[in-house]
Amino acid sequence: MKKPSFSVLISVYGKDEPEFLSEALESIFEKQTAKPDEIITVFDGPLSPELHRVLDDFRKGKEDFVRFVPLENNVGLGKALRIGTDFCSGDYIFRMDSDDISVPERFEKQMLYAAKHPETDVFGTDIAEFESNISGEKRIRSCPENHSEILKMSRFRCPMNHMSVCIKKSALIKSGGYKPLFYLEDYYLWIRMLAAGCRFGNINETLVFARTGNGFYSRRSSKKAFESRKFLLKFMVKKGMISPFEAAASLVFAKIFISAPEKAKALFYKYFLRS
């Protein structure tokens, strides 16, 4: 039986930090115990000379399997990943953000999981969030292991850590792929895949270190993010995943969260949403 192949899909934006990108790229190839079959990097609009230098240096000697997909204009994460998906030839697609760090055994452990659970279409891992220094304080975001618990969590919170997921490409295409929805591109995808009958799972082990940095709370409480949540909740009601009352209650909570001071948001994340 043919061993499944896997692609890594990354989107790089013009304001990304070259140093962080360099660390992210190193973590998905040089330091991995299982090498990807290909790495697809989408340039979401024009990039700085420094970012180009990092990318070109990384690609040297790997031209056969490191592919660049430059876009003329910034189109946003959802559309960039949708375009990048078309260039992925692997049976599975690993997501990776341009400023996070994968542990050396990440791909090996997730592909072993895929072999043991061939029925699973999407599976992620726990993540450890850090501000700027990876050796400093971290917050763990853990998601449920089994499908039924993931489905239950999805009704009120995003049940997957996007930067940690591995997705069966056939299931991704069947579900309509990535679609734009500011800040909630991933949550929207999971909901559509769950509604389409796809199977989910998680490995309760930290295999990705996720950089939060500046704007972590502001991005989650902007007017655009609120409108995205409103759209998503309406979609979930339409699919029968939540009731209209539950959708209204979620919107009220979102409104309260937006209005709360940043210190209050930080405490809420620390004591209720992270460990």
Image (cartoon, helix red, strand yellow):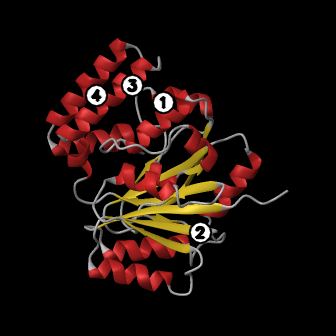
Instruction: State which quarter of the image contains the N terminus.
Output: bottom right
Tell me which amino acid carries mark 3.
Phe
Q: Do residues under tags 2 and 4 come within 8 Å of each other at their CB atoms?
A: no
| Dot in front, 3 or 1 | 3
Q: Secondary structure at mark 1?
A: helix
Q: Which mark is residue 70?
A: none
Residue 116 placed where, x, y %? 76, 48
Q: Nearer the viewer, residue 145 or 231?
A: 231
Mark sitting earlier along the chain (2/3):
2
Question: Given this view, does label 2 or label 4 mark the residue nearer the observer?
Answer: 2
Real-space CA distance between mark 3 and mark 4, rounded to the nearest whole angstrom: 9 Å
| Disc 2 + disc 3, Cβ < 8 Å | no
Q: Amino acid at mark 2?
A: Glu
The residue carrying mark 1 is: 153
Earlier residue among tags 3 and 1: 1
Residue holding disc 2: 38
* Label 3 crowd (10 A; few <14 / some 14-19 / many >=20): some
Q: CA distance from mark 2 to mark 3?
A: 34 Å
Figure quadrant of the C terminus? top left
Q: Is residue 49 left or right of residue 94?
A: left
| CA–CA distance in space, label 1 to label 2 | 32 Å
Query: Is 8 rendered above or below residue 192?
Result: below
Tell me how far mark 4 sits from mark 1, CA to CA: 18 Å
Give the residue pinned by disc 3: 235
Label 4 is placed on what type of residue?
Lys
Quadrant of the rendered structure where residue 157 is? top left
